[in-house]
Amino acid sequence: MSAMLLYYITDRLRFAGNESARRERLLVTIAAAAQAGVDYVQLRERDLNARDLASLAGEAVQAVQEGNHCSCRPAEAPRTRFMINSRTDVALAVGADGVHLPSGDLAPREVRALWSKSAQASLPGGKLHPIVASSCHTAAEVRLAEANGADFAVFAPVFEKSTFPARKGAGLAALREACCGLLAVPGTECICPCGMPVLALGGVTLENARTCLEAGAAGVAGIRLFQDPDVREAVARLRG
């Protein structure tokens, strides 16, 4: 089995303290995630307006860069990529690696066209080839995201979320279908070529992460998964 992809989604509101303390704690966690070798960090702070999001994103880019260049970082770990939730304009402005598209947002192809036009206009920090991820809730949405040019999908929710007990998870069978199609055999580890990578999100823990890979997921994503424990410890246990 290849190494799982790890996708940290931020939520500074889960940290204690005032806004300044939460922001500082978030930036420390982002830097630590990059130092530990997390593959992707998505800045998701949906309550912030564009100006405040861009300000925080600029600092987060620096935190990721510092983490990527830390001597304590695993030598074999690829560079941590930094994503912005939904806001292509903010991602371009701060030099992010790409955008995560919520369900119902623009199509990946539309984002790439917008990104290319803006980058060619020499918008500060613009990269010509963004990473574009899509949130998906069904196998059909995963297929559509792939057809529209997404680099990978984040499938959610897989498990029931303890903070929202009324929100039922789709389950491992639905994850398996999203990753591998209807021909996957339940009860066996998925080893078929699954095309576009699919990451599992929603109630994923250190204890059940492996079952997501066995269902065909290329990796796992989460907020609490990386923010509640020490992120370095979480990554070490997941990689182990």
Image (spheres, rainbow, N blue to C red):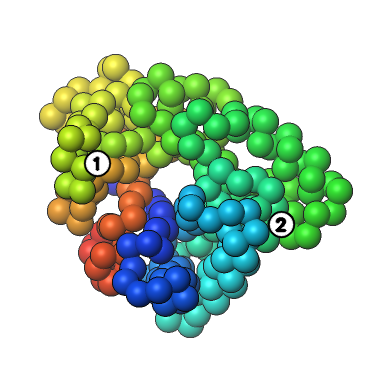
Residue 49 as seen in the image, left or right of residue 95: left
Compared to 80, does 46 lie above or below? above
Pinpoint residue 169: horizontal percent, then vertical percent.
22, 33
What residue does disc 2 label? 93
What residue does disc 1 label? 212
Compared to 96, does 203 lie above or below? above
Please say if the residues under marks 2 and 1 sit with CB atoms less than 8 Å apart. no
Q: Earlier in the sequence, mark 2 or mark 1?
A: 2
Pinpoint residue 215: horizontal percent, then vertical percent.
24, 35
Pinpoint residue 151: horizontal percent, then vertical percent.
53, 38
The quadrant of the picture occupied by the C terminus is bottom left
Secondary structure at badge 1 equals helix
Camera-nearest residue between 40 and 102 = 102
Residue 218 as seen in the image, left or right of residue 195: left
Residue at 58% in and 59% down: 53
Compared to 229, does 160 lie above or below? above
Disc 2 residue crowd, few under 14, some 14–19, many 20+, Cα 10 Å: some
Mark 1 residue type: Cys
Residue at 56% in and 52% down: 84
Camera-nearest residue between 192 and 109 = 109
Pinpoint residue 175: horizontal percent, then vertical percent.
28, 31
Mark 2 residue type: Ala
Q: How many marks?
A: 2
Residue at 73% in and 38% down: 114
